């Protein structure tokens, strides 16, 4: 490993967040303190830090509806199915999208949301696309990745 991406997010309840990310990544945190936890992962190569901020309200600014989210691109459908199965077996409730157009690509994906509303997308790109998003109903576009007015 030559590099590892670092993401630090504020969370309102460190215990709930640690439980969620332990399920999502199928690993216990590398370090825990009363106001902090981190996960140093090899797959994906990520250093995720959780910083406790008491009374932190759920942030709509970093959710799927505003097209701000975190993502893990996978390179085979078998890997996507394995991550999805792991999430479901752990009790997470993923939102599944199959053969969707998003950000000029066709993909199968699933989404999950942490206790503070941070969205995580796991996907496999199957083909390039000529449009930013597919032909989906207007009321669905606001909840879809790369909906008009949300990407930028």
Image (spheres, helix red, strand yellow):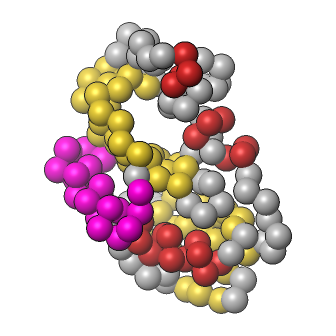
- Name the quadrant containing residue 52: bottom right
Q: Position of residue 123 (x, y in %)?
A: 35, 42
Q: Quadrant of the N terminus?
A: bottom left
Query: Is 2 or 38 nearer to us in this picture?
Result: 38
Q: Position of residue 99 (x, y in %)?
A: 29, 28
The residue located at (55%, 16%) in the rendering is: 138
The stretch of residues the image draws in magenta is: 74-93
Determine whether, in the image, residue 139 is placed left or right of residue 52.
left
Query: Is 146 or 60 nearer to us in this picture?
Result: 60
The residue located at (41%, 45%) in the rendering is: 95
Determine whether, in the image, residue 130 is placed left or right of residue 38.
left
The answer to if 87 sits in the magenta stretch is: yes
Identify whether 4 is placed above or below 27: above
Q: Position of residue 26 (x, y in %)?
A: 36, 73
The residue located at (30%, 55%) in the rendering is: 84
- Name the quadrant containing residue 44: bottom left
The residue located at (35%, 16%) in the rendering is: 129
Magenta: predominant secondary structure element? helix
Q: Is residue 40 visible?
A: no
The answer to if 82 sits in the magenta stretch is: yes
Query: Is 61 or 29 nearer to us in this picture?
Result: 61
Query: Is 43 or 55 nearer to us in this picture?
Result: 55
């Amino acid at each position: 490993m030559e590099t590892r991406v670092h993401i630090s997010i504020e969370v309102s309840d460190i215990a709930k967040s640690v439980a969620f990310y332990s399920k999502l990544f199928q690993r216990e945190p590398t370090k825990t303190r009363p106001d902090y936890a981190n996960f140093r992962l090899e797959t994906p190569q990520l250093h995720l830090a959780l910083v406790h901020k008491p009374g932190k309200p759920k942030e709509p600014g970093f959710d799927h509806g505003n097209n701000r989210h975190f993502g893990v691109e996978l390179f085979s459908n078998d890997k996507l199915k394995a991550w999805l199965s792991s999430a479901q077996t752990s009790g997470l409730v993923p939102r599944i999208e199959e053969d969707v157009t998003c950000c000029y690509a066709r993909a199968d994906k699933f989404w999950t949301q942490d206790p503070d509303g941070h969205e995580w997308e796991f996907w496999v790109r199957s083909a390039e696309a000529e449009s930013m998003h597919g032909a989906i109903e207007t009321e669905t576009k606001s909840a879809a990745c790369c909906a008009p007015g949300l990407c930028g």
